[in-house]
Image (cartoon, coloured by chain):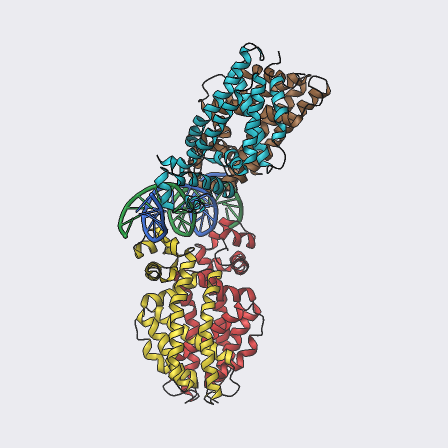
Chain colours: A red, B yellow, C cyan, D brown, E green, F blue
Amino acid sequence: MKKNKPKYHQIIDAAVVAIAENGYHQAQVSKIARQAGVADGTIYLYFKNKEDILISLFQEKMGTFVAKTAESIQVKQTAAEQLQLLVQNHFTLLTDDPHLAVVTQLELRQSNKELRLKINEVLKEYLLLIDQILKTGVENGEFNDGLNIRLARQMIFGTLDEMITTWVMNDQKYDLAASADDVTKMLLHGFSGK
Amino acid sequence: MKKNKPKYHQIIDAAVVAIAENGYHQAQVSKIARQAGVADGTIYLYFKNKEDILISLFQEKMGTFVAKTAESIQVKQTAAEQLQLLVQNHFTLLTDDPHLAVVTQLELRQSNKELRLKINEVLKEYLLLIDQILKTGVENGEFNDGLNIRLARQMIFGTLDEMITTWVMNDQKYDLAASADDVTKMLLHGFSGK
Amino acid sequence: MKKNKPKYHQIIDAAVVAIAENGYHQAQVSKIARQAGVADGTIYLYFKNKEDILISLFQEKMGTFVAKTAESIQVKQTAAEQLQLLVQNHFTLLTDDPHLAVVTQLELRQSNKELRLKINEVLKEYLLLIDQILKTGVENGEFNDGLNIRLARQMIFGTLDEMITTWVMNDQKYDLAASADDVTKMLLHGFSGK
Amino acid sequence: MKKNKPKYHQIIDAAVVAIAENGYHQAQVSKIARQAGVADGTIYLYFKNKEDILISLFQEKMGTFVAKTAESIQVKQTAAEQLQLLVQNHFTLLTDDPHLAVVTQLELRQSNKELRLKINEVLKEYLLLIDQILKTGVENGEFNDGLNIRLARQMIFGTLDEMITTWVMNDQKYDLAASADDVTKMLLHGFSGK
DNA sequence: TATGAATGAGGTTTCATTCAT
DNA sequence: GATGAATGAAACCTCATTCAT
């Protein structure tokens, strides 16, 4: 299994840095290789092609994040608390890794439709996690009966994504994580909630 | 003024179709020209370069949309109604022009950072329109006192953008506009509003 | 006859200015037309194509110069005096028309082989004039018996051309005409002449 | 160091042939590559861009020539002998490499001003070599006291250049090297020297 | 495993020339 | 005669991927 060899992660981390520093279209395979300290050809011993690096990058980083978040919210009783924790985790993940934030919010979106579809597959798990929280909320009476889950999920994900992208575009110069509570409340109660 | 000549719009519309059908990176200038029924060189009598076509495309389509929406919401008294109309307009615009939907939600996002910055300039007006609605809502007591305008704006825009992108990625096969009322309500009252 | 119409010369003069100011490859037909104050298409009523402008330019300017020089040296008795006058005329012509100097010495040489061959045809008359002086010198005993005319002609033309080109490349900032006497003497007597 | 690899010279030699046979503007990179027996992209492993090939070509060929000539004339005592050898070498170099003759005398002159300036830098060394001979001649009394070095240098270079260009334009069909002695004498003593 | 030299397809833009008005 | 909008051919360079060592 290639994923267990050190160079696999070495190359993925190099890709994050190379893309964050040079931009998606300027992060040539040779640059990633140089950043990883391996030869160009070595890349192809661990990844099928360039796209495969990017998908793997997303899978590794996002997969870990989803698993951790899924686990951590289990200790919370209410859906509101779970949502709050999810938002907090999401913000913290990207605040702690500025390079990763640039890559996932800005650079990777310049990829073609095909790659983005594969990225969406990875995201599906995250969306399922959100759905789970929402269902919990409906079941225990926290959320409106007959809540449109799909809509609510898109509202959560779209809001967080937009917030993070704006924050990255503003050079990450304000404290994103500090807004976690506010946005959670706004998602729960809306503009005219209370 | 080039913008008043018929070929200017002819080329922009051809670009929308060419990009929607071939994808951003496969929409070569020669394809746009062929679609517009002009010679390759003719493009350059109306646009500085390829990027200029894309920026102009966005300005023309989005600019018109923002102006129309801004005008139409003026007849509404409550912020809630205004918001509902904005959402409705946004969904209708893209539902009525499937090619444009693909181009703005998927293809144009593959452009480089420079182009995206220029696109953001155009979007800024739309965001200001949203802010206006929110301020109205706060002033007339519809929305919470001390509403975080920036956050609320990001919630609205992020939610709509996510909804539309998902709809486009699902080949626009369900009725997006039908969700306008539901999403408006959810934005106003949240998941646990009422 | 097109050559008698005012626009013919108007376009040629515009070409000299356009080429001198923009360089050979940046002097597009449209720039020449603008400089001449006519439409692009009008150029083609007076010239077969762009190359024809340049050949005509050379013919007009050089033709006049050769005729004038041929006439003026007839009053001189000795070949040495004739040569001195030819050199003086050549230098004066270009000193008096800095644009023309740039065009003939630098820019027109960037043209392709075909055009340069046609330019050489025009120059042939000038070279014949030089030959005439040389023959006169041999006949009246001023120059060595058995002087290699072809060689001598190439020495004269090559020397003048090199001097002028260097002068133009140095932005014409020194007095070229002041060297006429010195170079004439050097051509006549060499480095170790007297 | 790329210059030591065989393909560096292989490409330069291919460029000489391609330009000589097709003309400056018709010697596309793909033609040079084909002539060199490498892929188009390989060119760019050894040269920054097309212009870089041409500059390197001139530097390699002319640089070698100047160095060799500088060395060979050192064994000569008189300036006259040195000049004779320089002329002989110059003629022989181009007589022995007909392609190179066409390239340096005709084709490379069609390059833009920027490239020509870089070519001039290389030529500067050759002109310095000529100056050295002239100074030697003045110092040892062979040449006139107070000889205008700059003028004399322009006379030598201009004469040789004109002779070679004419010879190339006449398809190199006569024996250029045979004129070396004659032209040397004429430079030394002029038309009316002896 | 690891290397890195070599490959070669593919696209934006310019500009001389035409021709309907 | 004069216009100027429209034409369309043509080329440099990049970079993901391969494969002999």
Q: Quadrant of residue D148?
A: top right
Front residue of this view, candidates B64 and F4: F4
Q: At 40% from the left edge and 41% from the top edge, which residue is drawn?
A: C7
Q: At 63% from the left edge and 28% from the top edge, which residue is drawn?
A: C179
Single out the residue that lies furthest toward the front. Answer: C75
**Residue C142 percent coordinates (x, y):** 58, 12
Q: Quadrant of residue A124?
A: bottom left
Q: Quadrant of residue C57?
A: top left
Front residue of this view, candidates B37 and C156: C156
Front residue of this view, candidates B16 and D41: B16
Q: At 42% from the left edge and 34% from the top edge, which residue is drawn?
A: C56
Residue D84 visible in the snapshot: no
User: Does C95 sit left or right of F4 as displayed?
Assistant: right
**Residue A150 percent coordinates (x, y):** 38, 78
Q: At 55% from the left edge and 59% from the top edge, which residue is drawn?
A: A21
User: Does D116 sit left or right of B129 as displayed?
Assistant: right
Q: Give above or below for C170 relative to D89.
A: below
